[in-house]
Amino acid sequence: MRLIKYTVFAAFIMAFSLAATAVNLADETLNYKVLYKWGLVNKTAGRATVTLRGNATHYKAVLVGRSESWADNFYKLRDTLISTMTRDNLYPVRYDKIAHENGRFSHDIVKFTRSGNTFTGNCTRHRRGKNDASTTTQTTLLKAEGMTVDMLSVFYYIRTLDFLRMKNGDTKVINIFSGKKKEKLTITFHGNKVVDINGKNRTSHYITFKFTTDGKKSSDPIKAWISADGKRIPLKLEGNLKVGKIQCIYTGS
């Protein structure tokens, strides 16, 4: 179940743009079901809701995810991701990941600053094991050159991606800060595709994402289908596990 957890949340955070521009996003709530597929097995393993609320200067995004009751018997998960970002250009300001996973607790906090093209993340990591009486705390300083996002704010950069000017095979690489490390995210565009979402054909922009750390692959490519309309909602995300695969399917607003 831990592989499922990683793939689910990695998938949710993988929407990105090729060029950052001022954007105006409407408040929204997006709902997803998380499916585990292996041979004839096709079960809903979890649910997730992603909300966005804005004010005059900032946006606040919140992702809440949980495993289904049957999956709780194997790996109980209740996770919350929170990202505050600037209204102009969607630069991250603060990122929180609060996780209750299989009896363990963690809270990662990343506070961002930017000077020119340099992004800095002051990271604080709180951890408490399944049988621990106290919580440990570690701090890390991360730096990167070039556009940098967190593991949720990247979800909204899709709004600034100019799909109409992209060609099949176009790629872009950016930085992502988590609570303890920085990674490179490579986005590859594969043209427009029709995808079945809950029995309805939807035209979408088809993209794959790949994480690397210090030049080494962090995950297999993850597939994403983004609605080919003004909202550009991630409709479906898919990642492979050692056994089977996981899919996140948009169920409505």
Image (tube, helix red, strand yellow):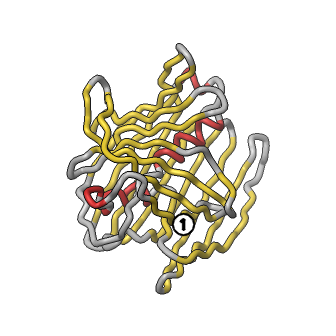
Q: Residues within 10 Å of mark 1 (few under 14, many from 20)?
A: many
- Seen at 69% across and 64% down, the residue is 214
Name the residue located 38 percent from the left edge and 64 percent from the top edge.
18
Place residue 183 in its image quadrant. Answer: bottom right
149 left or right of 240?
left
Counting the numbered discs, the total is 1
The N terminus lies in quadrant? top right
Please state which amino acid type lies under the numbered disc 1: Asn
Q: Position of residue 245 (x, y in %)?
A: 55, 30
Q: Residue at the top extreme?
A: 40
In this rendered view, identify the residue nearer to me: 179 or 98: 179
Whether residue 226 is situated above or below residue 112 in the rendered picture = above
State which quadrant residue 234 falls in: top left
Q: Is residue 248 left or right of residue 214?
A: left
Considering depth in this image, is 123 or 245 the residue closer to the camera? Answer: 245
Vertical placement of 37 versus 111: above or below?
Answer: above
- Which residue is at the front of the view, 18 or 84? 18
Residue at image coords 69%, 43%? 104
**Can you tell which quarter of the image residue 130 is in?**
top right
Residue 155 position within the rendered picture, expressed as x and y whole percent measured from the top left:
41, 54
**Is residue 53 in view?**
no
Mark 1 lies on residue: 175
Residue 91 % position (x, y) = 41, 71
In the rendered image, the quadrant that contains the C terminus is top left
Q: Secondary structure at mark 1?
A: strand
